[in-house]
Amino acid sequence: MAQIIGGITTSHVPAIGRAIAKNLQDDPYWKPFFDGFKPVHRWLETARPDVVVVFYNDHGLNFFLDKMPTFAVGAAPSYVNADEGWGIPQVPAFTGEQALSWHLIEALVGEEFDLTTCQEMTVDHAFTLPMALLWPDQRWPVKVVPVCINTVQFPLPSAKRCYALGDAVGRAVRAFAGEQRVLFMGTGGLSHQLDGTRAGFINKEFDLAFMESLIHDPTWATQFSIHELVEKTGTQGVELLMWLATRAALGAGPVTEVHRNYHIPISNTASGLMVMAPQV
Ligand code: DHB
Ligand code: FE
């Protein structure tokens, strides 16, 4: 059976791509952010994932506002990045783990999640930059399964529903008849708002409470409606739903907090990073 080795949650700001392209990792602005990934690199050396299931939100590269699935799962042989207009370099293609994709799709539809299945799919900065933060040489040593959750166009799925999705993905991975070591990754957040009168909004107190809840009270955030989450975290801060799905995928049992970093701001965003591993 496939083995779940852990979950990594991180922000996905496009400016990270520019900082990577310009080698600004030791620049005073960027150092506290990039240094946060050094313990993650050490952890990955022993964790040795074969597959990463990535919970993220597409921002208009693969799904535009005219067609917006609530939940979509990639089942493509490979996934490429494309120009999103940020002017950041594209990254090498990712290889899909198609057998696991279809297994997840069967399991999730079997549990009455109404999915969009994507046999062709481009992946945007929310997918590519976290991968580049984990593997800076961009020679991806893993196969991937993208799981896309709409946090861009209302109505958005509730926190409770995203937790349920993550839980179902976790159970399906555990039931997958393979030997793969599976890592979950959730990208987005933490608090940020890019538009409107509250542009620049950050809520450190809520972010820290949310990060803490993932370790000690994982369903805590499911008490909040989407509108409450927008109020507390900003219009784009709701991307923290990816963190919730990732934590849920690790199962109801206790997790060990392997690493945590929180740094304000990167671009307009409170950047957070966590590594969690299920206790065995
Ligand atoms: C920023 C953050 C995001 O999550 C995103 O998708 C785009 C931009 C930012 O802070 O600049
Ligand atoms: Fe985003």
Image: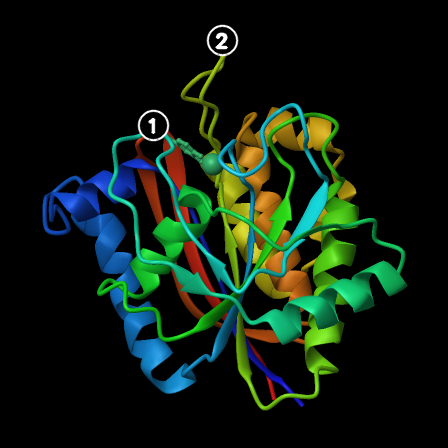
Secondary structure, mark 2, is loop
Residue 69 visible: yes
Image point 10% across, 44% down: which residue? 27
Mark number for residue 197? 2
Residue 68 x %, y %: 68, 33
Residue 252 visible: no
Report the residue marked by disc 1.
85
Mark 1 residue's CB less than 8 Å from ligand 1: no
Q: Which of the two residues, 107 or 272, is positioned nearer the viewer here?
A: 107
Q: CA distance from mark 1 to mark 2?
A: 24 Å
Q: Which of the two residues, 231 or 43, is positioned nearer the viewer here?
A: 43
Residue 153 x %, y %: 65, 26
Secondary structure, mark 1, is loop
Label 1 packing within 10 angstroms: few (<14), some (14-19), many (20+): few
Q: Quadrant of ligand 1?
A: top left
For the C terminus, give its image quadrant. Answer: bottom right
Of callouts 1 and 2, the N-terminal one: 1
Label 2 packing within 10 angstroms: few (<14), some (14-19), many (20+): few
Q: Amino acid at mark 1?
A: Gly
Residue 25 x %, y %: 15, 51
How many numbered discs?
Answer: 2
Q: Amino acid at mark 2?
A: Thr
Q: Nearer the viewer, mark 1 or mark 2?
A: 1
Contact check, label 1 and label 2, Cβ < 8 Å: no
Check the image and report above or below for 204 versus 274.
above
Q: Which of the two residues, 177 or 10, is positioned nearer the viewer here?
A: 177
Image point 75% across, 56% down: which residue? 165
